[in-house]
Amino acid sequence: MNYTTIDYHCDGGVATLAFNRPDKLNSFNATMHAEVREALDAARDDEAVRCLLVTGRGRGFCAGQDLSDRNVGAGDAPPDLEASIRENYNPLIQRITGMRKPVVCAVNGVAAGAGANIALACDIVIAARSASFIQAFCKIGLIPDSGGTWWLAHLAGRARALGLALTGERIDAATAKDWGLIWDCVDDEALPARARSLAEHFATQPTLGLGLTKAAVNAAFANDLPAQLDLEARLQGEAGRSADYREGVAAFMEKRKPRFSGK
Ligand code: T3D
């Protein structure tokens, strides 16, 4: 597939999806939405893909919606943003969180608006020390979307969620880590290799079990303990029927390294 707004390629069990509109800080236009959707579906459906790595080209990660794609002149009818969110951003977030494979995100630069919240939706987020996160929405009269109000409230707590969302203040990668928004922050030069080696590690692990783990943790935000215990029992039943569970236990008993197939 010849994409014009993203790079997408797979090797060694890792699919890499890189936003690639660097002159617009990788902000989303309609073409990019369609291409990202298609690439996410390809990563989901390809059994050879056992981990997805999301990043950005150029100096930014993603600046959210391409604002030059919105007609806001005095005579223009207001754009239907509800439709845009329902048709574009929500399905994107649902594809990332619903993917039964680990999604690693390498935040290489500024992540603003929906770009920040796309990063937060990924499973393991590693940011370059010079990267930053901005809930830019309030500066243009909007509310945080792409799960922003949910991620911030759950991950950072009410005070920080409201602080970030109402001021639109930029936080650096170290602060994002300190506040529990992301997994790690590394020196800029180290980011590509660190993210790649983590993705390669996941590509050798029990994919089915990792996918179920992700589903359980994501469900925990909405469940009470009895519901979560019930879900764990059901998902453990599924994990216990996997080839990788058999292989993991056999390898342990035989004192050798497991060879996981992902199934
Ligand atoms: O509309 C809907 O469907 C609703 C959904 C909304 C989701 C959203 O994401 S709304 C929020 C949209 N995003 C923003 O409001 C962020 C806008 N960008 C910025 O505030 C700044 O660019 C940054 C803080 C991210 C980075 O600042 P800086 O100084 O490092 O870079 P810059 O000079 O502002 O940007 C570099 C270029 O990228 C520049 O183009 P130029 O002047 O070199 O030709 C700038 O216009 C362009 N750019 C950056 N962000 C966007 C953009 N162009 C279009 N849309 C953008 N979002």
Image (cartoon, rainbow, N blue to C red):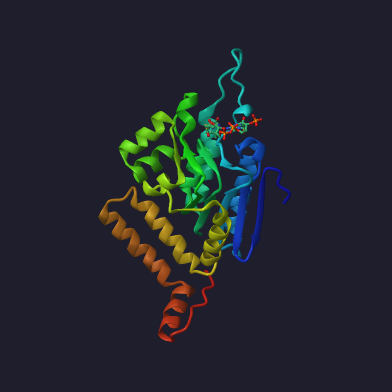
Q: Is residue 50 depicted above or below 63 in this figure?
A: below
In the image, 127 versus 35, the foreground residue is 127
Q: Residue 21 location in percent, x, y?
A: 66, 40
Query: Seen in the image, is 57 located left or right of residue 234?
Result: right
Most extreme residue toward the right is 2
Q: Quadrant of ligand 1?
A: top right
Find the residue positioned furthest to the left.
226
- The quarter of the displayed image where residue 168 is located: top left
Q: Nearer the viewer, residue 141 or 164?
A: 164
Residue 87 lies, in percent from the top left, at 55, 37
Q: Position of residue 49 (x, y in %)?
A: 59, 62
Q: Which residue: 31% across, 36% down?
A: 159
Farthest residue, direction bottom: 254
Residue at 52 percent across and 66 percent down: it is 201
Q: Is residue 83 left or right of residue 170?
A: right
- Total numbered badges shown on the rendered structure: 0
When asked about the image quadrant of residue 15, the answer is: bottom right
Looking at the image, is 152 positioned above or below residue 95? above
Q: Is residue 130 above or below residue 30?
A: below
What residue is rendered at 51% in x and 53% in y? 187
